[in-house]
Image (cartoon, rainbow, N blue to C red):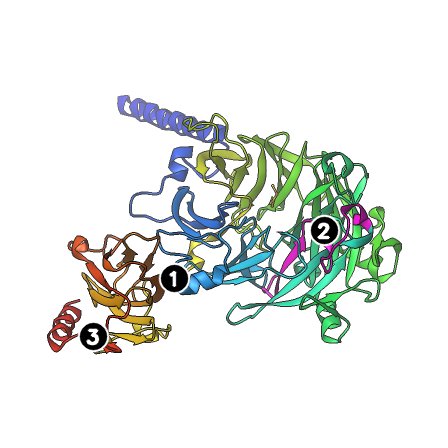
Amino acid sequence: MKRGLRFGFAVALVATIAALVAGCMASQGGGAAGSAAQKVYVKPGEKDAYYAFLSGGHHGNVYVYGIPSCRHITTIPVFTPEPAVGYGNDEESKAMLGGYTWGDAHHPGLSETDGDYDGRWLFINDMPNARIARIDLKDFKTRQIFGPIPNVSAAHACPFPTPNTEYVFAASRFSVPVPNRDVRVEDYAKDFRGIIAGVKVDPKIGTMSLGFEILMPPFDWDLADAGKGPSHGWEFFTCYNSEMAYDSLEIKASQNEMDYFAAVDWRAAQKAVDDGKATMVNGAPVLDPVKVKGIAYLIPVPKSPHGVDVDPSGQYVCCSGKLQAEVSVYSFAKIKAAIDAGKFEGEKMGVPTLKFEDCLEAKVPVGLGPLHTQFDNKGNAYTSLFLDSQIAKWKVGPPWNVVDKIDVYYSIGHLMASEGDTRHPTGDYVVALDKLSKDRYLNVGPTHPEAAQLIDLRGPKMELLYDFPTYLEPHYAQMIKAEKLKPITVYPLAENDKPGNIKRAEDIRVERKGNRVDVYGLVVRTHFSPDIVRVNQGDEVYFHWTNLEQDDDIAHGFGILWSSKNMQVEPGETKTMHWTAEKAGINPFYCSNFCSALHQEMQGYIEVRPRGTPQASVVRPDARTIAELNALLAAR
Ligand code: RUQ
Ligand code: CUA
């Protein structure tokens, strides 16, 4: 009897604790079990579920974060030199930067196959110089910078890849005369034009090349997104300033009730170029919609739109007017029907305009300052509200209502959902990318970091999990399942065919032709071979270092004293660096990347003799040095 009572009490106690725990979880939003701290905690030694790629804004690079831990894992240099690793210092990356030392990167775009991120490449734009970079996700390195794309004046609506990465795009944020020439700004409406450029991507190796350009009215082309599913084959571009103002835009470009988004049939545009209907302008095939029909259409959007986002099904195109408290949702089927029926309201510089009512599906009253929309796997959309500093969650489909809101800190721009731009978002997280952090972090003076905030989407209500500061300035970002990426750990030496590579101690040499000196050297723990290089004052010296290591994470550096010359050479890699021997005397160099117990010993000397000192045309190491090096390599 006594025992039964005690048992009953124990059952009741367990039930009470369970209820308390459940209640506690519900108050946290009822997502995956556990506290916010537990949900972001990735144990030491364990790895994150997602890679997030955040644009570095006017820092010109890409930040890589792990989600949900929000740990900053690395920074990929893209449009801006990075002296720590020598990006912009070695000959290959210097050539790729093309003389630019600045870029403003806004929108990372992961490559897709069948509308899902495939983990092959990441594209990102440099707005002011209208360039697009391709980062290879095998080694997280920038491998191509395409541009400046002719005639495009600042590529903001860029790159927003199509579902099979057939194209990336670039549309003019500003308008200028095309071709650019001596005109007055007052002749803006007459002489200026926007450009929408379609850049082809080689399906096997990712190389970009220009496909077509379309001459557009001189509006400010702003953002883009690719159609998918039923809307595959189309790319959508918002614009503001359909008023065609050229000064005091903040007043004059907000007059019209409606601006537009453009729907571009990229297959038709490419076909028109292939059929010879383009005019070459500055080396680019430009299509003029006055003469070439069926490539672009304009659809009215209320009040200075910013973001345009296609839902995962590809049926709906969602545009937000910055000065309107609603998201306007358009039905692609309706747009297509109106185009097919030739139901146009008029035209702008040859581009037919459709009727607002013919294309609109719904208006969703989300709140003030809607900018961008992302999606989950349960039929919900999430719109960032800049003025309200909130995210609104709403139902895609009737009754098109807002079901939840969450405060963010502060002034959110873009937001990124897990696999959020694909046909299959995962619905795990959204990250708010806030323009202002104000009081959220330790004060570091007048300029605060930007703020990112991780929000759990798994419960019925959004739950704020974590704040993390980011350096200037993530505009947009994308998040991909970690399991989709399989980066290499070393460059296989056997596959190294880089110019200047050598793989055997016997091939080490210094070659001279006139005043050009080529040093073909090897680096391996813990030695530069050669570690003494003799040149003359005025020589142009090219160091080609091959790192013979085949061990994960054993990169060597090469830094030259009294210079800005430094680079990093990763395992199995060859890199070339140019240095001019300006002064006679001794000029040391060293390994700038801590590599081993004897890292500090990894150093050498350049002996710079006066001009005209006789030097052999080829210098090779002696037999003893080769034997020593071979012993070192064998012990590697
Ligand atoms: S932008 S805050 Cu440069 Cu993509 Cu919208
Ligand atoms: Cu090699 Cu430090």
**568 or 468, which is in the foreground?**
568
- Residue 175 is tagged as 2
Residue to which mark 3 is pinned? 505
In the picture provided, is 281 more to the left or to the right than 391? right
Cβ–Cβ under 8 Å for marks 1 and 3: no
Give residue 574's quadrant in the image. Answer: bottom left
Asked if ligand 2 lies within 8 A of label 3, the reply is no
Residue 183, x across and y down, in percent: 77, 52
In the picture provided, is 165 more to the left or to the right than 398? left
Residue range of the region highlighted in magenta in the rendering = 163-189
- Residue 90 is tagged as 1
What's under tag 3, amino acid-wise? Ala
For the C terminus, which image quadrant? Answer: bottom left
* Residue 184, magenta (yes or no): yes
Residue 634, x across and y down, in percent: 15, 71
Give residue 515's quadrant in the image. Answer: bottom left
Q: Residues within 10 Å of mark 1 (few under 14, many from 20)?
A: many
- Residue 535 is tagged as none
What's under tag 2, amino acid-wise? Ser
Q: Gap between marks 1 and 3, in whole Å?
A: 23 Å
Report ligand 1 position as a quadrant: top right
What's under tag 1, amino acid-wise? Asp
Image height of 6 relative to 84, above or below: above
Judging from the image, what secondary structure is the residue with disc 1 in? loop
Residue 30 visible to the viewer: no
**459 or 589, which is in the foreground?**
589
Residue 473, x across and y down, in percent: 51, 41
Q: Gap between marks 1 and 2, in whole Å?
A: 35 Å
